[in-house]
Amino acid sequence: HMNWTTNIHTFPKRAWEALSQNRMLLFFTSLLVCGLFFGVLISKNISEENAQTLVSLLGGFTLNRTAQPVLTTFLNSLMSVLPFVLVPFFLGVSAVGVPLIPCVLVFRGLGLGTALGYLYGVNGLKGIAFSVLLIIPPAIVSSILIILSCKEAFRFSMLLCRRFLPKADGQEGLWPQLKIYLVRFLALLILLFLAAFVDTVCSAAFSQFFVT
């Protein structure tokens, strides 16, 4: 009983400590969510010309997924997310990557929000069902990977920035940190295959219900 009561009283403190230790993750997640929110707003004011183009792209996307081989769907899904992991990787090995890395998350959120908002605007409840079954599950997995990749890239880019600051001579060499950086991005790339697999499974299971 005493332990249970103690845990209740210490929970706010432990929760705050956990939030403090993950401030960068929260910051990057908020950037993606803000981008998603503005993407939804943009979708409401999209021009007729862009609307017709988007409808055409969405229709072809759906039809292709039901007609093309599963391996092709997997590869297309993989390649659609890969740039959002590779761009942070290369920005991370540059000292000028610090202000640019957050833009990757905003751009990702804008694209996702525009797609979701426009699907709802054009198709109503059918658009919501399409999003829930075909867009959101793989988007959640891939967005987590993108956030983690940006976090790692930002951290390493900050290390490079500190090398150019005064009193940086006493710092340890970057090679041990670079090895950690490379290993973590290799792990993220492996997990990226999981995101593509989830996308492929969802597409194979549900896309047939949205073909007219």
Image (tube, grey):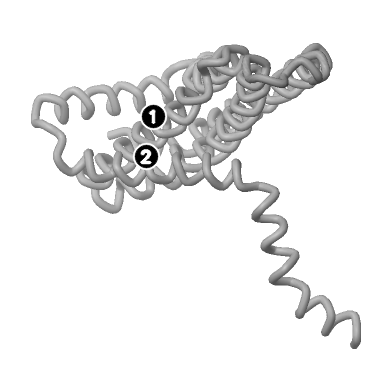
- Numbered label attached to residue 94: none
Residue at 42% x, 31% y is 108
Residue at 42% x, 25% y is 66
Badge 2 local density, few (<14 within 10 Å), some, or many (20+)?
A: many
| Disc 2, SS | helix
Residue at 70% x, 49% y is 21
Q: Is residue 189 visible in this depiction of the protein?
A: no
Work out which quarter of the rendered image holds the N terminus and state it. bottom right
Q: Residue furthest left?
A: 48
Report whether 81 appears left or right of 59. Answer: right
Image position, residue 200 (x, y; %): 55, 28
- Read off the residue under disc 1: 107
Residue at 90% x, 86% y is 2
Q: Is residue 59 visible in this depiction of the protein?
A: yes
Residue 145 in which image quadrant: top right
Residue 17 in which image quadrant: bottom right
- Read off the residue under disc 2: 35
What's under tag 1, amino acid-wise? Answer: Phe
What's under tag 2, amino acid-wise? Answer: Gly
